[in-house]
Amino acid sequence: MPAGNLTERQEKWFASVRAGLERDTGKAMDEWVAIARTCPEITHRARLKWLKDRHGLLQNRASQVIDAAFPPGMGWSDPDQLIANVWTDPSARKIFEAVDAAAAAPSGVTRTARKSYTAWSRKVQFAALRPLKTGGAMLGLALPVGADSRLEICRNESWSERLTMRTRLGAPSDVDHAVQAWLRAAWDRS
């Protein structure tokens, strides 16, 4: 992932995964890239499974190898395109824009685009937003369980386990003073 799209902590984590790959496997990234390019699979998930089954690489290391072997990989190098791919529904895109403005209001916020959601971090992730198939978006927040009766406990979400509470947003107007306060409180905790 490019610098600027990651927090300092995330940059260190990605570097440690890459360093550990060579240390623990005895193969440099270039060697793993050459191996990955022999994979007969064409989808990211199938390539992950192939690297795990045939070579013992787990999710994080295999993802980095695939991203290096098949640029632009998961699209990390073009966060604006990832965001465009995730936020295709015009009404959901407006909710994203409202949350993005509120989440970025405090200083030191890094927005990170993922394949199925967008996340905001300071030192660590404090919020994430994903579109819903039924319309609207789901906002996850790094807040204590029970922080507000209008929030529910996160279940079965693909974002950080730090995001313990969530709420459904149906329109940009739902990003009201309460949501802004929750985002600020989650930012404070990050």
Image: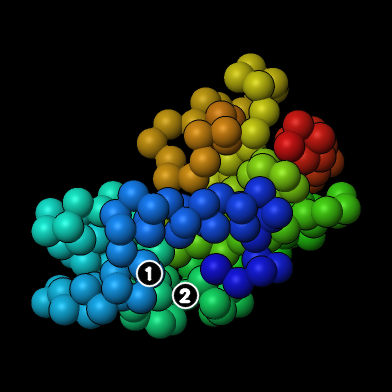
Q: Hey, what amino acid is under mark 1?
A: Met
Measured as percent of width and height from the top left, residue 7 is found at 69, 55
Residue identified by numbered label 1: 29
Q: Earlier in the sequence, mark 2 or mark 1?
A: 1
Q: Residue at x 34, y 49 (%)?
A: 24
Q: Residues within 10 Å of mark 2 (few under 14, many from 20)?
A: some
Point out which mark residue 75 bears.
Answer: 2
Q: Is residue 7 visible?
A: yes
Q: CA distance from mark 2 to mark 1?
A: 19 Å
Measured as percent of width and height from the top left, residue 128 is found at 59, 48
Q: Residue at x 64, y 34 (%)?
A: 142
Judge by depth and name the residue closer to the eye, 45 or 157. 45
Q: Which tag is nearer the camera, tag 2 or tag 1?
A: 1
Q: Residues within 10 Å of mark 1 (few under 14, many from 20)?
A: some
Q: Residue at x 63, y 17 (%)?
A: 146
Give the structural element (helix, strand or loop) at label 2.
loop
Measured as percent of width and height from the top left, residue 33 is found at 31, 75
Give the structural element (helix, strand or loop) at label 1.
helix
Quarter of the image containing the C terminus?
A: top right
In the rendered view, tell whether residue 167 sits above or below residue 93: above
Horizontally, residue 157 falls left or right of residue 31, namely right
Horizontally, residue 140 falls left or right of residue 21, namely right
